[in-house]
Amino acid sequence: MKSPLIVALDYADPSAALDLAALLDPSQCRVKIGKELFTVAGPLLVEQLQDKGFEVFLDLKFHDIPQTVAKACHAAAQLGVWMLNVHASGGQAMLEAARKAVDASPHRPLLIAVTVLTSLDAPALQQVGVFDPVSVQVERLAALSAAAGLDGLVCSAQEAAQMKLAHPELCLVTPGIRPPEHIADDQKRTMTPAAALAAGADYLVVGRPITAAADPAQALAAMLAACAA
Ligand SMILES: O=c1ccn([C@@H]2O[C@H](COP(=O)(O)O)[C@@H](O)[C@H]2O)c(=O)[nH]1
């Protein structure tokens, strides 16, 4: 049985990503490739990680006009990834176009939508013209994503209980996971692994607590133990 852990391979160099992957057991976690790593390493690294047995979450957070996002989702699905994502704030037509494109693909990854980035808090949302509480904006974007038939949401674990209640059919992918002793870095809405799982998160995305640790293997083992507890 796989753990809910998704390790964010946030590196500028594919060899660093492969080095960390060598410490990981694909039966115990999945890996995430984001914008930096995909820009430097591209589809080849996706293939290399999949060949090692990893399920890959391609975290490119597409956000553009519907046709562009549909074509990007189709191309991403062709890579054989396990999961890919778009920004829910791209709107209903964009979400529906993404859904249609993935459904038309021979390989159908999970398609999920980012609600409110975990690096944002209420003052930051106000700066972009959103004066509702974070939880209200998350629910607004979650409802849009559910109506478009997406498979899941990216939200903070702080909204997980609310999201599980409102949208039990959607899987919840939660970044901003921090062990109790770890600094928040640029994350604003954080939670510990155990609290996130208790709140209803299905998947925990963890980057720097592992990748920036003095001993990534030890940090990973501690994280896996926290997930299993
Ligand atoms: O709302 C979001 C959406 C995506 N992310 C991504 O998750 C990881 C988190 O890394 P940490 O080092 O554990 O903070 C990173 O790749 C982000 O791009 C997110 O943090 N929040």
Image (cartoon, grey):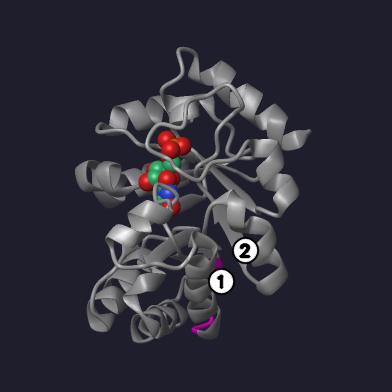
Q: Residue at x 69, y 59 (%)?
A: 161
* Residue 10: quadrant of the picture: top left
Position of residue 64 relative to residue 212, above or below, is below
Q: Residue at x 57, y 25 (%)?
A: 220
Tell me where residue 135 appears, x and y as whole percent: 54, 63
* Crowd band around label 2 with a 10 angstrom C-alpha radius: few (<14), some (14–19), many (20+): many
Q: Is residue 151 magenta?
A: yes
Q: Which residue is mark 1?
A: 151
The main secondary structure of the magenta stretch is loop
Q: Report the side of 100 relative to 63 (left or right).
A: right
Cα distance between the residues tagged 2 and 1: 6 Å
Position of residue 137 relative to residue 54, above or below, is below
Disc 1 residue type (three-letter) = Asp
Q: Secondary structure at mark 1?
A: loop
Question: Could you tell me if the residues under marks 2 and 1 are in contact, i.e. CB atoms within 8 Å?
Answer: yes
Q: Which residue is mark 2?
A: 171
Tell me where residue 85 appears, x and y as whole percent: 41, 63
Q: Residue at x 43, y 51 (%)?
A: 121
Quadrant of the image containing the C terminus? top right
Q: Which residues are magenta?
A: 148-152
Disc 2 residue type (three-letter) = Cys
Q: Report the side of 144 relative to 59 (left or right).
A: right
Tell me where residue 218 appears, x and y as whole percent: 58, 17
Residue positioned most to the right: 229
Q: Report the side of 81 relative to 72 (left or right).
A: right
Q: Is residue 122 magenta?
A: no
Q: Residue at x 55, y 39 (%)?
A: 177
Tell me where residue 64 appears, x and y as whole percent: 24, 73
